[in-house]
Amino acid sequence: MSFDSHSSAASQPSPAGVGQAIRGSNQSGVRAYNERLVLSIIRQAGPLPKAAIARLTGLSAQTVSVIMRALESDGLLAKGTPLRGKVGQPSVPMGLAADGAYFLGLKVGRRGTELLLSDFLGEVRAHHRKSHEHLTPDSAVAFANETIRAFLAEMPAERVARVAGLGIALPFRMWDWVDPANPATASLAQWRTRDIAAEIGAAWDFPVYLCNDASAACGAELVFGASGGASEGASGGAEDRPRDFLYVYIGYFVGGGLVLDDMLYTGKSGNAAALGSVPIVTQAGERGQLVDVASLVTLEEMLRAAGHESARIWERQGDWAADEAVLEAWLDQAAHGLAQAIVASTCLIDLTSVRIDGSVPQEVRAALVARTRKALAALTVPGIERPRVAEGAIGFDAKALGAASLPLSDRFLVDRDAFLKG
């Protein structure tokens, strides 16, 4: 699997997993697909010996040996500790090589822009964030190019050659946020006619991908959150992650993502699972949308209205130090709205699992999940089974890491098109 580089802008690739065995092909001319299939299996299941790979893919032992040797030679796989059984030669599990490939992820947000560099295992090797009050395409492009240049300058040449692409996660239709009563939002209209993926891609010799930010965060949960470590009742194995789930991300606004049959579904416009727009009834009995009750900007407004400092809720880590009474009220109203959105989604898709994540401290996320479960249990919903609600596994880095997963998925994993052709 070569590291040929080219500059391009692409829409959202759909990563696929291996919750069920995906069959390979022994015919010639499909080596790239079989390599992706092997890498996808190892990413989800962890290091495996060749015999296990052959069993899961249906490929012959000889074909698997050829593939594994090629991937090891390309630096994408590395040998693990031999597993000694009672008889015969010990089997050697093969796992992903952390330095096999690198991926850049750019998150463009209302209050900050950030870029990270991840390795083949999804570990963040470098990260930089810049806060801003007014988001413009020019500032996003300048930040991306300056930060990429700084990241690459710190890497040895052989590792720079393994940078496989840049993913960009940003809210779609940002021009809809223009408020005639607020002149500070006028610059958002510029996003209607700008293609920052093409502009940034013109400066580099690797491909560039673009995705809705909430869908990108969902992609991070799909590709890197397979262990389900933060999930309700998780035991840490790849089998814990459901094949289908609704994903909720609490950020400046609230958004969502949808995984169906182990693949990120983004829809025709790339804006599937736009949960912020779901109609709900507030605790006061008023009609509104989920975005009105479950977004961080709503919490900010509530804190300001009560005379409290709100800047701390935009920090990445640590204690928010938000007023407890205001935070409690926000958690209650957010959970009340989320339960309604989950029910509406389940009526349409027959969901069995929901993951809730966001740019919030872990204890706040846990409290929101607990209250959402309680609010969901209190709703009368004849005719459907309530889905399980659990915490997401990524947290603050979900959008940027999800952006980085776009080139990873497109270049190294089995995607929807390859699966259908297989």
Image (spheres, helix red, strand yellow):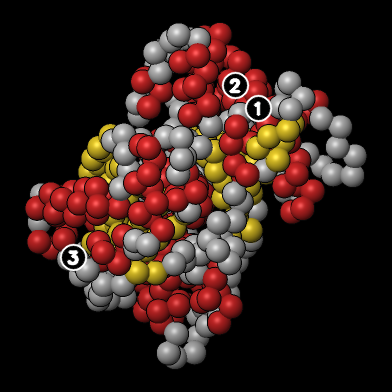
- Crowding around mark 2 (Cα neighbors within 10 Å: few <14, some 14 to 19, many 20+) is many
> How far apart, in angstroms, are the residues tagged by discs 2 and 3?
44 Å
Q: According to the image, label 1 marks what residue?
A: 335
* Residue 412 shows in the view: no
* Residue 121 point in image, percent of width and height: 35, 51
Quick one: 204 or 373, which is closer to the camera? 204
User: In this image, 179 relative to 21: left or right?
Assistant: left
Residue type at numbered disc 1: Ala
Quick one: 401 or 70, which is closer to the camera? 401
Vertical side of 119 occupied by 7: above or below: below
Indicate the secondary structure of the residue bearing disc 3. loop
Q: Is there a contact, CB below 8 Å, between mark 1 and mark 2?
A: yes
User: In this image, 165 relative to 229: left or right?
Assistant: left
Q: Is there a contact, CB below 8 Å, between mark 2 and mark 3?
A: no
Extreme bottom residue here?
28
Which numbered disc covers residue 203? 3
